[in-house]
Amino acid sequence: MMWQQGISDRQLFDFENFQHSLTNSPSDLKAYKKALHTANEYLLEQFEAGESVKDILYRRAWLIDQLLTSVWQNAITSTDITLVAVGGYGRGELHPCSDIDIMILTAPRIDKKLTSEIEKFLAFLWDIGLEVGHSVRSIKECISAAKADITVATNLMEARVITGSDKLFDDMRKLTGPEKIWPSRKFFQAKWTEQIERHKKFDGTEHKLEPNIKEGPGGLRDIQMVDWVAKRHFSAQRLSELVTHKFLTQDEYNSLAAGREFLWRVRFALHTQTGRHDDRLLFDHQRNVAKAFGYDTKDNSGVEQFMKVYHRTVRELSRLNEMLLQHFQEAILYARRKEKIKPINKRFQIRNDFIEVSHDRVFKRWPSALLELFLLLQQNKNIKGVRASTIRLIRESIELIDENYRNDLRNQSLFLEIMRQPRRVGHELRRMHRYGVLSAYLPEFSIIEGLMQFDLFHVYTVDEHTLFVVRNMRLFEQDEYSEKFPLCQQVLKEIPKQELLYLAGMFHDIAKGRGGSHAELGAEDALKFCRNHKLPEFDSRLVAWLVRSHLLMAKTAQRMDISDPEVINNFASKVGDIMHLNYLYLLTVADICGTNPQLWNSWKDALIADLYNKTNLAIRRGLENPIDKAERIEETKKASLELIKGQSGLNKKPEQLWESLGEDYFIRYSPDEIAWHTKAITKSNMVKFPLIAIRELTFRGASEIFIYTKDTKNLFSRTTLTLDNLGLNVLDARIVTSKNDHTLDTFIVLERGGAPVKGKDRIREIKNALVQQLSALDKPLKKSSRVRSSKLKNFPIPTRIFFSHDENNSRTIMEVSTTDRPGVLSSVGMAMEFCGVTLQGAKIATYGERVEDIFFVTDENNQIITDEIKLECLQKSITESLKIN
């Protein structure tokens, strides 16, 4: 192998001394372990000194060759057998914790003696500390396995002899080559399909915040994919030969090689930090890996700078991968097809279903064609993609997109036309991003390219999140997503110009990373862009308002009591009209779904939809004519009675129960919930407390747990801790105390995985646990059994508590921001009880590692807490209890 030539380094491996140490005992474990340890320490020193990681990997593979050859010569007596390196070891790319993959190539039959020798050989390798992946095969078995599995065929293609019979190996290579099995056409199709499926596992994006540096899009496996096809089709020994075959320019090869070198260094550092074979660049490791690259800061800025370099590198590698695979497709899959060329216009033509420029001076002569190409892709369903030569020409012509270009009315019209198309808006924006056109046309977008947010809430870089938001907006109108986004599909039909929604999506986070309010700065950018593109002033202001207000709806729904008519009226006055509400609702849902695929659930869906519907009703009624509180209560009671009417087995009339409940109860609960509570209480004999009722799934998009019992201390803290131990997430809590000292508590919950409670057995388990805990209030509480996530140590968030007063509802609003961990609600509950505070309700919101919970509390007289001592008690007690927790 070329990479083995000239490797001889006594500091890495002193062969003479090693052989001398084996003179008396050829199987001296200590000598092998010492040699391995010394070499690993030396290679680590070389890495930290900045030596070429390529050379370090090759030298480590060479070292393992020497050790395996020594063990082999002492263990194996047969000459008709070959020790073969396969996989990454076969390529000579051996990282600190990579598996050492070997194949033992044998004659068709092996005797018991050789079988025993092979077993002893493998056991010895494990004894000296080598993690070996192995197979034992004859040539016939190699052929059979390779035919059945392209992964085996790929491994054999990269195989090389470590020691043993060269003839046996050469025969195997001939019989498993492209002339015999997996011809290059079939091989390429299979590997291409394999890459597509692999990318799907990572949401088709290279910009996840915890990327897999080997398997993810733009990772090492994508480079290997190109290498494999080159080997199979061109019999190439090195990637650089693709320059000779005119598939890459020298600059593109240099970029590919530099990207691979960077990823190799990241992987080497990651293996060194973790001490194990793990290619996921998790938050736990990013800080230490960043330090290895010189990004050593006390705050998160160093990590964010390092990850920005990482994401930009893999984006470039993704582009090169796409271009090369397109080249291969043209050279391998379409080589035998008769070329079909169909002109589109002076600038473009379709060649074998792929668009290309009509000549290589198109972009210089017609710079607008840099945007026109993407519009043509949207308008022609039959175009499968872009020819590789045109992708290259786009990249080479990016410098044509300057300030004059951006101010040219033709280019502005083309960009807006792309945004107005009925199909493939998100798809072509993503392609524009990959080719570098989007950031050239929108310089502000280049600032957020590869920009990560070091937290557990966001899972994509800001640029990738933005493109997902626009993609989500496109999904709303597709039939296959009607079940997931039913209201969105309905609302989308009501907005007059969808392109304004897409522009708001493009600009909503564009000012992140600049300091200050990204919503305000982004609104300024959006307004400037829209006016510069000659949009009507009303449309320009609408887009700017959406960007400025893009967090308003989510914050209102998740942090305020939307059962309160005053909250709805205030929100409605900020929105103004139905059109603004429609646009904001669609942007809000697309934004939440684009932040984290796991974030959107039935609860969030119902919560945002509830706010939308209530606001819609308030606006249609007239902002000058808000719903009267007494009118609302009367309507709720009438609707509740209608639902109860005709029910048998009630021990008393509903009105008798309602007399003990205050007006607030009929504001905060829906008729459906009131009817459910009433039936449960009036049908029960209530000989024993507590009464527990559970509904699997309600209109709120989650499960509801209703508790009716005598009002006592520790009720909230004990209930929430029990629910936590049951693996349930509390999303909302409403507490109502009756005049006869009974409490009606309702908890909205989901299972830890985001699904509602389901099944009789699960409901019985929850009921039994609650009854057991709430029937023994004198017994001490057990700590939460939930294990704290190890990731949280990377995101320490100090506990902060803020108070404000809700004058209209005579209550104090307490906001608690802290690190998510087991038992937070229970700790807060115990502190409230200790300070003599009454809880009326809670809104629970978790954003990755951060919880921002809102508690509606009063003093013992159900009034706003004005006593500074009591507020100080809450501040100190909650802070201290969460320190312990």
Image (cartoon, rainbow, N blue to C red):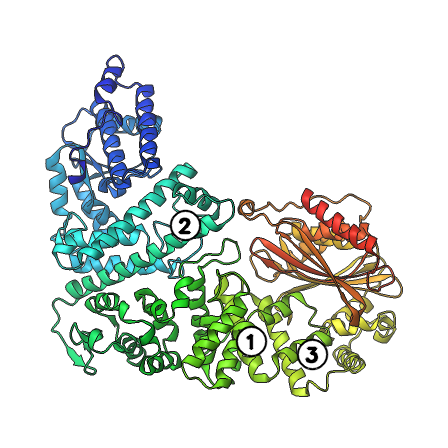
Q: Are marks 1 and 2 in contact (CB under 8 Å)?
A: no
Foreground residue, 187 or 555? Answer: 555
| In the image, farthest residue toward the front | 404
Residue 811 locus on image (x, y percent): 79, 65
In the drawing, does residue 170 fall left or right of residue 432?
Answer: left
Among numbered discs 3 and 2, the one appearing first in the sequence: 2
Q: Which mark is residue 171?
A: none
Residue 635 locus on image (x, y percent): 77, 82
SS for dot 1: helix
Residue 761 locus on image (x, y percent): 64, 56
Residue 4 locus on image (x, y percent): 18, 36
Q: Which mark is residue 569?
A: 3
Quarter where residue 233 is shown? bottom left
Q: Are marks 3 and 2 in contact (CB under 8 Å)?
A: no
Callout 2 amino acid: Phe
Quarter where residue 128 is shown? top left
Residue drawn at x 18%, y 58% as measured from the top left: 248
Callout 1 amino acid: Tyr
- Residue 646 appears in the figure: no
Discs 1/2, front: 2
Among numbered discs 1 and 2, the one appearing first in the sequence: 2
Q: Which mark is residue 306?
A: 2
Discs 3/2, front: 2
Discs 1/3, front: 3
In the drawing, does residue 817 fall left or right of residue 160?
Answer: right
**Residue under pointer 1:** 585
SS for dot 3: helix
SS for dot 2: helix
Residue drawn at x 30%, y 71% as measured from the top left: 401
| In the image, farthest residue toward the top | 24
